[in-house]
Image: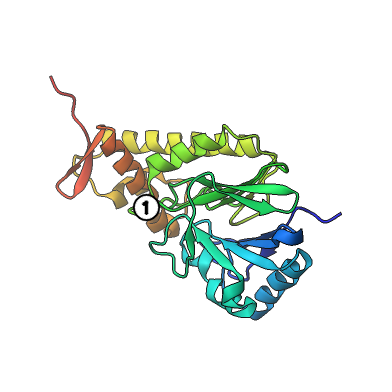
Amino acid sequence: MQQPYTIILAPNPSIMTGPGTNTIVLGDGVEGATVIDPAIDDVAYLDAILREGAERGAIRRILITHGHPDHIGGINALRKRLGTHLVHVFAFNRKGTPDIDEEVPDGTIFPAGDDTLRAIHTPGHRFDHLSFYLEKARVLFAGDLISGITTSVIAPPEGDMLDYLNSLKRLQELDIAEIVPGHGPTIRDPQAKVAEYIAHRRLREQQVMEALEDLPRGTKIPEIVKLVYTDVDPKLHSIAAWSVEAHLIKLEREGLAERVDNGWALVEPTA
């Protein structure tokens, strides 16, 4: 019996992508196959996608979780190999994502063999982020909402920490058997991982607030990072700074932090 989906690893490993981007091929029969996140233009990698798609009734649609380059870099090459008129490309928003044929509202249903694939708007990592839920199999294709190797980077202005936490909470309402992340291995204990992610972000936020209590008003983000990310290699502090900024913006929106002299401080209580 054919498995409901196949993961094809893109050969684009890096500090940001881990072992590479997970590309998904699923579906079969008269409705054809679906590809999620064709990552790069690489002949052998695209050949593998095309072979799997052919075994599943020919590729008819491409779905994009979000517009970051490591998730959309193979769109044009794959469409050229397939014939542009034969395949339709879907994403939540055309902004920043080239060659999209149709925007996908939250809740859109796509065929997936004897199953159905539901698009779920899960912003936070990026404003246009979609996850895709294979409903009968209870599999979530999570893009960069969840990582199989580390926590996800939230980099403003495209990333938003408040949206991100709300998206994670939305996952807690789903009956998920496994999560296939955009990078790293499949997650077999999905709700435990989601809870871990939420707890981690809450801890980091508390650490940011404690740092602001200890540091002078108007302290800049790199100094906050040094105090908060003592458990992270200093070479990665420039990446950690994005998440600290995202936490600070969230706290600012909630009236708990404010910008002072090009730096940050806790909002002082009024008398």
Q: Position of residue 106 (x, y in %)?
A: 49, 45
Q: Amino acid at mark 1?
A: Trp
Residue 73 in view of the camera: yes
Q: Quadrant of the C terminus?
A: top left
Q: Relative to 116, is 102 above or below? A: below
SS under mark 1: helix
243 or 236, which lies in front?
243
What coloring was used for the rendering? Answer: rainbow
Q: Position of residue 96 (x, y in %)?
A: 39, 64
In the picture, measured across the screen, residue 251 lies left or right of residue 33, that is: left
Q: Quadrant of the N terminus?
A: bottom right
Residue at image position (53%, 44%) is 107
Residue at image position (41%, 41%) is 163
- Tell me the quarter of the picture where residue 135 sits: top right
Task: State the residue lying farthest toward the top.
Answer: 271
Residue at image position (29%, 49%) is 221
Residue at image position (76%, 63%) is 56
Q: Position of residue 237 (x, y in %)?
A: 40, 55
244 or 228, which lies in front?
244
Q: Relative to 140, is 184 above or below? A: below
Residue 41 in view of the camera: no
174 or 19, which lies in front?
174
Residue matched to label 1: 242
- Near mark 1 (Cα within 10 A), the count class, few <14, some 14-19 or many ≥20, is some
Q: Position of residue 30 (x, y in %)?
A: 74, 61
In the picture, measured across the screen, residue 17 lies left or right of residue 244, that is: right
Q: Relative to 161, is 54 above or below? A: below
